[in-house]
Amino acid sequence: MLNQKTFEQQHKQTWAELDECLTALEATRLFRKRKTDSAHHLPTLYANLCQHHAIALSRGYSHTLVDTLHAQINRAHHQLYRYQGNWLARTMRFIGGGFAAAVRKEAKLFGIACLLFFGTALVAGSFAAYSEDIAELILGGRTKFNIEQMYEPNTFDIRPANMEDASSFYMFGFYIANNIGIDFRVFASGIVFGIGSVFFLLLNGVSIGAAAGHLSAIGYVDTFWGFVAGHSAPELLALCISGTAGLMLGRALISPGQQSRALALLRNAQAAVPLVLGAGLMTLVAAFIEAYWSPLEFALPIKVAVGLLIWVVFGAYLLFAGRAK
């Protein structure tokens, strides 16, 4: 094992290069100069420094050396993440493909989430369409009555009670708050070994599927499908993506691998953040469509055609956006 003096002699050139690099980068900010070429060398120097710091700690080298290396790590960390671009550029990269790539990276869990939600919705919808008694059993008498009143063709008004005079902008905010709340519950409940996310995916699948099946069976096709067709793609896909993020938390606790559960949970939570943010943006789009397009009175074929087009757009985005050339 190298003694401290030999260790310092061996790596002092690397530390000097890093200090020179950081000084140059800090000067660009102080004097508002253009970004220098030093930024390109920083990631490698930063990785080496972290390794040297870990070695110094494990070998019990002096506190002075350890503290000096740690201070340099803090400087390097600040500069490294400062040069990832401004917030607008990062946002555009995220929307342009980073989000879709993050979803594809968890394709198996996303597939499971979609199966849990859409599979349950299909089964519940089939049973509810077959029998009104089953629909009432699934939905409950009050909920069944309320949705019938909402979508009744002669008095159709999707706005909840006491909100009949609400503007489209107010409903836009209402849909955002309501749907993001649902998405967050689906995600956050995954901390209970994924069971919570599974439960909420199934619960939403049952309730949405049963409502769709029952309203279709009693002839409210134009009002129901005409209203939900436009915003269904971003809203339901966001729900499944939130479920995927929740299942990632459960996976970390059930199968942490060679790392501790706490570390696995931390890493999976960090990887889940892009999914949650992207789901929030999709919910925002869904709320806008639901508030401004869905209530408009167009023929059902037009509403369904627009809805299918939106499904194709979002499906293509998740499949192809952000792929390397």
Image: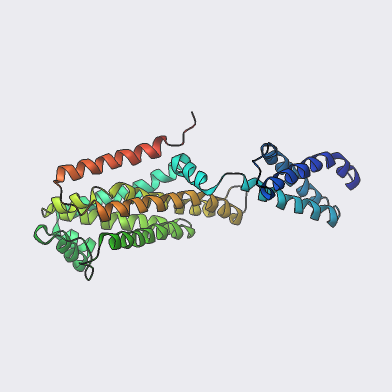
Q: From the viewer's perspective, tell me whether residue 29 is left or right of residue 100.
A: right
Image point (73%, 43%), residue name: 24
When the figure is inspected, residue 104 is found, relative to residue 241, above or below; the finding is above
Q: From the viewer's perspective, tell me whether residue 243 is left or right of residue 120.
A: right
- Where residue 27 sits in the image (x, y, percent)? 71, 47
Give residue 36's quadrant in the image: top right
Q: From the viewer's perspective, tell me whether residue 154 is left or right of residue 121.
A: left
Outermost bottom residue: 162
- Where residue 16 sits in the image (x, y, percent)? 81, 42
Q: Nearer the viewer, residue 185 or 12?
A: 12
Image point (23%, 48%), residue name: 229
Q: From the viewer's perspective, tell me whether residue 265 is left or right of residue 219.
A: right
Q: How is the model colour-coded?
A: rainbow
Outermost top residue: 325
When the figure is inspected, residue 170 is found, relative to residue 198, above or below; the finding is below
- Where residue 179 sits in the image (x, y, percent)? 34, 58
